[in-house]
Image: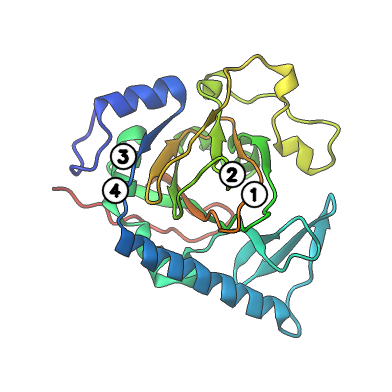
């Protein structure tokens, strides 16, 4: 039964699109002033992490398949693939490092459609991720999120993610690409000969899927997507960043992924 939430709930068309294609888009939801504040927040987080990484006694850099990872300020930081690059590729979580990012979790424009998709009157945060995609930033191979989470989550089918473009996204700067309807196939074969990380990437040669679609959208747009939707991105070939935030919601009273605490969402009705 469809629960009545706020005016930000998903429409019947969006619900149908999500079921059939595995995602839907809302264009230009956040305005210029809001985006300026969010960009300032993510850059402040980036500076804080860089300062912590340079601190004597900081956690050591770990390598998986020659890629650099580091645990800093309560976040799992993935560094850019180029060893010489002092830039963060992505980090998870990030909301605890800036009040502006924490407040975003309770924004009805984000949790409203997620609540509709999950059919839940109460929500909590599962995870949040910050992607920087700096100039010359590396691509992210085709993958599904569900295999990544399944090791530590028994309710992966009760998760929905929303990506917020903080910058206008194009093919040139590494916009998100998705394969429509790929979520209907469930968990797909992985790359078995690509090291440890290959097991998290989708082997498209073993499945017959629809052609991929580039989600070129203006800054402030939202993409709601299913955990089994195959998606990825290409390298950033421009001189500007393509930054994005991803929030993943789950039913209420559930602990955050890989954490013991519960970050409840302030769900309000209108």
Whole-Å distance between the Cαs marked 3 and 4? Answer: 7 Å
Residue 172 numbered tag: 2
Whole-Å distance between the Cαs marked 4 and 2? Answer: 28 Å
The secondary structure type at the circle numbered 4 is helix
Q: Contact, CB < 8 Å: mark 3 with mark 4?
A: yes
Judging by the rendered image, the residue that carries numbered circle 1 is 237
User: Does 9 sit left or right of 17 as displayed?
Assistant: left
Depth order, front residue of 245/166: 166
| Mark closer to the chain start, 4 or 2 | 4
Give neighbour class at mark 1: few <14, some 14-19, many 20+ (Cα, 10 Å). Answer: some
Q: Where residue 140 appears, x then y in whole percent?
A: 66, 43
| Mark closer to the chain start, 1 or 4 | 4
| Mark closer to the chain start, 2 or 1 | 2
| Mark closer to the chain start, 3 or 1 | 3
The secondary structure type at the circle numbered 3 is helix
Judging by the rendered image, the residue that carries numbered circle 3 is 113
Depth order, front residue of 169/19: 169
The secondary structure type at the circle numbered 1 is loop
Residue 266 numbered tag: none
Give neighbour class at mark 4: few <14, some 14-19, many 20+ (Cα, 10 Å). Answer: some
**In the image, farthest residue toward the top:** 208
Which of labels 3 and 1 is toward the front? 1
Query: At 67% from the left edge and 65% from the top edge, which residue is drawn?
Result: 87
Give neighbour class at mark 3: few <14, some 14-19, many 20+ (Cα, 10 Å). Answer: many
Query: At 74% from the left edge and 73% from the top edge, which residue is drawn?
Result: 59
Query: At 59% from the left edge and 36% from the top edge, which residue is drawn?
Result: 146
Give neighbour class at mark 2: few <14, some 14-19, many 20+ (Cα, 10 Å). Answer: few
Q: Contact, CB < 8 Å: mark 2 with mark 3?
A: no
Whole-Å distance between the Cαs marked 2 and 1? Answer: 5 Å
The secondary structure type at the circle numbered 2 is loop
- Residue 254 in view here: no
**In the image, farthest residue toward the left:** 270
């Amino acid at each position: 039964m469809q629960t009545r939430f706020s005016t930000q709930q998903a429409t019947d068309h969006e619900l149908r699109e999500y079921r059939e294609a595995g995602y839907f888009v809302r264009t230009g939801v956040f305005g210029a002033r809001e985006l300026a504040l969010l960009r300032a927040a993510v850059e402040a987080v980036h500076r804080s992490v860089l300062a912590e990484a340079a601190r004597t006694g900081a956690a050591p850099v770990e390598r998986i398949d020659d890629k650099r990872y580091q645990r800093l300020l309560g976040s799992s930081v993935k560094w850019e693939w180029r060893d010489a690059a002092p830039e963060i590729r992505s980090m998870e979580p990030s909301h605890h490092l800036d009040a502006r990012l924490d407040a975003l979790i309770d924004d009805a424009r984000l949790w409203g459609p997620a609540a509709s998709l999950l059919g839940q009157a109460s929500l909590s945060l599962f995870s949040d991720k910050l992607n920087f995609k700096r100039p010359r930033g590396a691509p992210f191979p085709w993958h599904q999120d569900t295999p990544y989470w399944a090791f530590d989550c028994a309710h992966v089918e009760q998760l929905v993610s929303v990506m917020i473009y903080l910058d206008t996204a194009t093919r040139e700067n590494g916009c998100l690409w998705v394969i429509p309807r790929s979520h209907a196939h469930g968990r797909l074969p992985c790359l078995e000969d690509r090291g440890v990380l290959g097991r998290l990437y989708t082997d498209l040669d073993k499945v017959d899927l629809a052609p991929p679609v580039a989600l070129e959208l203006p800054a402030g747009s939202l993409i709601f997507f299913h955990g089994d939707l195959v998606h990825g991105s290409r390298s950033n070939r421009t001189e500007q960043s393509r930054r994005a935030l991803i929030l993943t919601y789950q039913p209420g009273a559930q602990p955050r992924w890989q954490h013991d605490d519960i970050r409840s969402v302030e769900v309000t009705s209108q």
